[in-house]
Image (spheres, grey):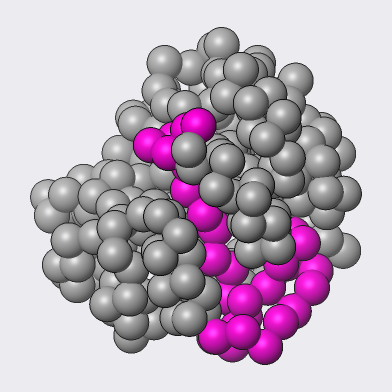
Amino acid sequence: MILLPAIDILGGAAVRLAQGDFGASTVYDEDPLDAAQRWVSDGARALHVVDLDGARDGTPVNLAQVRRIAAAVGVPIQVGGGLRTADSVAEALAAGAARVVLGTAAYRDVDFLDRVLAEHRNRVLVSVDARNGRLATSGWTEQTEIPVGSVIETLGRRGVSRFVYSSIERDGTLSGPDLDEVSSVAGTVRGSFIYSGGVRSLADLRALAGLRQVNLAGVIVGKALYEQRFTVAEAQAALNGRE
C-alpha cells in the first residue's frame, strides 16, 4: 500500500479545504512545487494533485503547475480536477501526469468515459466522492442521492477498475477514517482503490493497513502531513507494517 501526499491547488497555492468547502481553505504553500519537492525529498513514491479551481469551474486551470511539478519530481503524479473532455485528459497527460482522476464527467457522459478508457485505460482512475454515503459531484459542490455502492458497481460494469474513494465528511477534519466504510467499499470494488479522508495519525494508517484489503492500493493524506503530525517516511512505514 502506498502513501500519496495531497497537493490541492486553489488560486495558485497549495491549500486544504475542510469537508470540501471552498470557503474554508487554508493555504500551506504559496507555491505548490514547494510542497511537492518537500514530500518527495521525505520519501513520497507518488503524489496526488487536484486542480480545485478546475474542479469548481469544470475545466483545468492549473495545468501549468502540474507541468512544473511533473518536471521537477522523479515520482508519478496523478492529477484530477476539471477533466471533463477527452482533450483535457490528453492535456493533463501531456503535462506530465502519470494517471488522471476523472470525476463528474465519468458519471454524466458515457461516451466520454468510454473514449477515455479506450485510449488510456491503465492511466485512468475515477473518483467516487461520498457525503453520507451518497455521491457528490462538481468539485463536491453538488450533492446527489445516489448510493456510492451502486455508483461503483455501475462504473465497474463500464470497465472502470481503478478508483479514488473520498469521504467528504472527514476530509480536512483530522477525525480519522471510517474503517467500516473502507471495508464496505473494498467489498464493492472489483479492481483497486485509493482511500482519502480524515487520516490524522500513524495509528490511523496502521488501522487501514490492518484491514488487509488486497484491493486497497493506497491512502491519500493531506492536512496531517501539512501540520507535521507525522512525516511521509513514517507514514509509509506504518502502511508497510514497519511502524
Q: Is residue 90 above or below residue 177?
A: above
What is the x, y in percent for residue 203? 28, 67
Q: Residue furthest top?
A: 71
For the record, the magenta segment spans 119-147
Residue at the image position 74 percent from the left and 79 percent from the top: 143
Q: Is residue 104 above or below residue 37?
A: below
Magenta stretch: includes residue 121: yes
Q: Nearer the viewer, residue 66 or 101?
A: 101
Q: Residue furthest front?
A: 111
Q: Is residue 182 something one can see in this rendering?
A: no
Residue at the image position 86 percent from the left and 39 percent from the top: 11
Q: Nearer the viewer, residue 39 or 101?
A: 101
Q: How many marks?
A: 0
What is the x, y in percent for residue 192? 31, 56
- Magenta span main SS: strand
Residue at the image position 65 percent from the left and 47 percent from the top: 112
Q: Nearer the viewer, residue 26 or 3?
A: 3
What is the x, y in percent for residue 150? 48, 81
Drawn side of residue 80 relative to residue 206, left or right? right
Drawn side of residue 4 relative to residue 104, left or right? left
- Where on the picture, by quarter, is residue 63? top right
